[in-house]
Amino acid sequence: EDQVTQSPEALRLQEGESSSLNCSYTVSGLRGLFWYRQDPGKGPEFLFTLYSAGEEKEKERLKATLTKKESFLHITAPKPEDSATYLCAVQAWRNTGNQFYFGTGTSLTVIP
Amino acid sequence: SAVISQKPSRDICQRGTSLTIQCQVDSQVTMMFWYRQQPGQSLTLIATANQGSEATYESGFVIDKFPISRPNLTFSTLTVSNMSPEDSSIYLCSVERTGADTQYFGPGTRLTVL
């Protein structure tokens, strides 16, 4: 079964306390893996796309990495403004076209 | 990227009524999608709307309940028909631009059905 699982569901960090969020997937025919940030009451905001195992992308305090079965979003020295829900999605090719599979997200709270 | 707007941003509706949600994009796109996001849950794809053809609905969603229009390459509407409290959710439109594999999302419409 095609599935994307994110862990933990919720994470509370002190400001400056680095950590990682996990996204594991059992989706065949991977075309890409995407990370989004979603603030309360808003739509998801695109962060990164990863296409192949070993690939890494960075943006400010965030770094995304990809292996064959999972991806990590590393947050270095987080600040309160990094508080949000982080969504992972996997794109796969199907006979009907590209299909996106979304995880349920990790809710991150960074405490000053 | 793409700039996407949705109207209304939120609404409170009575059971049995219908609401039409508009999605406007700042440039022409081929693929537009409508999602539902219920509290504490991830995004569920309702349908894919391509200009010039009928929308393609995912399992569990039907045209009579969620009719979609796609009159041009920058605009789409989703109607939530004969609403019940179970339809209370955030409805999101997104676009996939040619050459960019990711999707860009609108700000969402928060619907509450009483």
Image (cartoon, coloured by chain):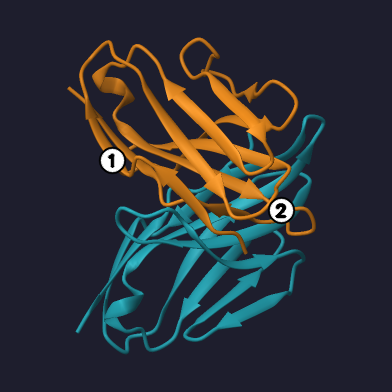
Does residue B78 appear anywhere in the picture? Answer: yes
Nearest the viewer among A83 and B82 is: B82
The colour chain A appears in is cyan
Nearest the viewer among A110 and A54 is: A110
Which secondary structure lies at badge 2? Answer: loop
Identified at 72% across, 74% down, the residue is A55
Number of the label disc, if any, that sits on residue A68: none
Q: CA distance from mark 1 to mark 2?
A: 26 Å
**Left or right, residue A62 beside residue A77:** right
Query: For mark 1, does the 10 Å Cα neighbourhood hold few (<14), some (14 to 19), or many (20 or more) residues?
Result: some
Q: Earlier in the sequence, mark 1 or mark 2?
A: 1
In the picture, the quarter occupied by the C terminus of chain A is bottom left
Q: Quadrant of residue B109?
A: top left
**Left or right, residue B60 beside residue A38:** right
Q: Chain of mark 1?
A: B
Q: Which residue is mark 2?
A: B97
Which secondary structure lies at badge 1? Answer: strand
Q: Amino acid at mark 1?
A: Arg
Number of the label disc, if any, that sits on residue B10: 1
Instruction: Give the orange chain's letter.
Output: B
Identified at 50% across, 49% down, the residue is A5
